[in-house]
Amino acid sequence: MSHYTDAAQQESLSTYPIRLFAGGDIVDMLVQTDLTDGPRLNDQVVKEINNSV
């Protein structure tokens, strides 16, 4: 989750309307939301995840 090959990056830019995220990007985005309590996901989010699997 931290790096993508040059080929994967070129493919995503030329073919698919997607964005590639590294693991650190995902963590940074979560921290900017109300989904976390400090360094961890809040209990409600964890419950929802557990209920969906």
Image (tube, rainbow, N blue to C red):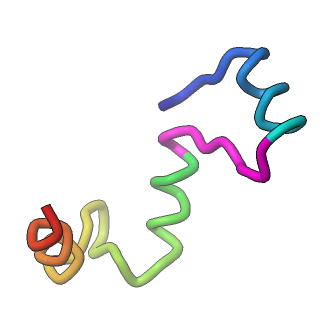
Quadrant in the rendering for residue 29:
bottom right
Q: Is residue 22 magenta?
A: yes
**Magenta range:** 16-24
Position of the C terminus by quadrant: bottom left
- Of all residues shown, which one is farthest toward the right? 14
- Of all residues shown, which one is farthest toward the front? 15
* Residue found 27% across the figure and 75% down from its top: 37
Between 42 and 50, the one lying in front of the other is 50
Residue 43, how many percent across, how many down? 14, 78
Between 39 and 18, the one lying in front of the other is 18
Quadrant in the rendering for residue 13:
top right
* Residue found 71% across the figure and 48% down from its top: 19
Side of 36 relative to 24 (left or right)? left
User: In the picture shown, does residue 20 fall above or below 46?
Assistant: above
Residue 39, how many percent across, how many down? 30, 61
Residue 24, how many percent across, how many down? 51, 43
Side of 20 relative to 17 (left or right)? left
User: In the picture shown, does residue 13 fall above or below 47?
Assistant: above
What type of secondary structure mainly makes up the magenta span? loop
Residue 30, how many percent across, how many down? 45, 66
User: In the picture shown, does residue 39 fall above or below 18?
Assistant: below
Q: Is residue 12 magenta?
A: no
| Badge count | 0
* Residue found 19% across the figure and 68% down from its top: 49
